[in-house]
Image: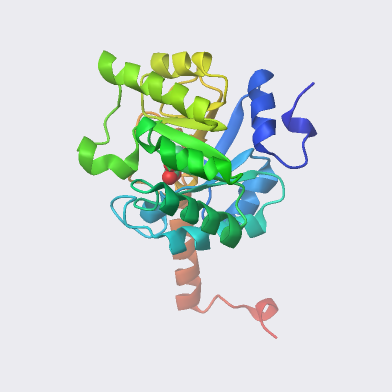
Amino acid sequence: MSVHKNVKRVTTHTLQEMKDNKEKISMLTGYDFSMAKIIDSAGIDVILVGDSASNVMAGHETTLPITLDQMIYHAASVVRAVERALVVVDMPFGSYQGNSKEALVTAIRIMKESGGHAVKMEGGQEIIESITRILTAGIPVMGHLGLTPQSIYKFGTYVVRAKQEEEANRLIEDAKALEAAGCFSIVLEKIPAELAAKVAKEVNIPIIGIGAGGGVDGQVLVVHDMLGINNDFNPRFLRKYHNLFEEMTNAVKSYISDVRSGDFPNKEEQY
Ligand code: KIV
């Protein structure tokens, strides 16, 4: 029997049942009320309030500048729209890496002030202390390994990670450490498909991929990328389901033209 068809609200347990039942998990980012309403009513399993809001919503070059208050604002807007999906909220850069007490305070603020259902954190064994402390407060944690955009200045580029054996082995160890610590799921970003499939096989918790091939338990994309709202980001892993940039531009051009010509508003569009 299908797990995802029979749940009214997706929980972390639903995702585990889906993996156990070999049902793929669908996840998209969401940052605002209107978009979250569309994604949720379409039946998505997980909405990630990603710190990619820093790029997509605020126009920053990296995810580093977004603040905790801004993440909470986005997450609370998404939560108000959602009826079914699990809402996972990114912990922003600088809010958890160095100090597990501060990490807990951050996670508690996110849960209390946004109403989100779980947090996501980038990193492996180096952040286990923070993860453990957050989990002891009863807050579910999703991990994130591979290309972790908060470390972009360490990596230097956004190229595929863990192509070399040493980094691949470290990633597998990190995934096992996250599972042992109690994370309910892990995102793997931009790593070889074979490695991602191996991780999905060797750990029992759901593995969600982005640019990590089809051998994992689910997929995530940035919603503005897959809808083609953002038209200058075209990595190989991205499938565009629409060209909304063009369609929206044309709609706005039609409006401008109608206003200029006096065609809008017409008699039926006024009081
Ligand atoms: O912030 C984000 O959008 C993410 C996804 C790319 C997984 O972390």
Q: Quadrant of the N terminus?
A: top right
Residue 257: image location, x then y, percent: 45, 70
Foreground of the two, 167 or 250: 167
224 relative position to 140: left or right: left
Residue 165: image location, x then y, percent: 28, 13
Q: How is the image coloured?
A: rainbow
Q: Quadrant of residue 44?
A: top right
> Does residue 142 sit above or below 73 in this rendering?
above
At 46% across and 18% down in the image, what residue appears? 199
At 49% across and 38% down in the image, what residue appears? 132
> Does residue 129 sit above or below 207 in this rendering?
below
Foreground of the two, 214 or 197: 197
Foreground of the two, 212 or 180: 180
217 relative position to 121: left or right: right
At 65% across and 27% down in the image, what residue appears? 16
Q: Is residue 164 visible?
A: no
Q: How many marks?
A: 0
Residue 111: image location, x then y, percent: 58, 54
Residue 66: image location, x then y, percent: 37, 58
Q: For ligand 1, which image quadrant applies?
A: top left
Q: Is residue 118 visible?
A: yes
At 32% across and 52% down in the image, what residue appears? 64
Residue found at the very far left of the displayed protein: 156
Residue found at the very far bottom of the displayed protein: 271
Foreground of the two, 202 or 256: 202
> Does residue 203 sit above or below 185 in this rendering?
above
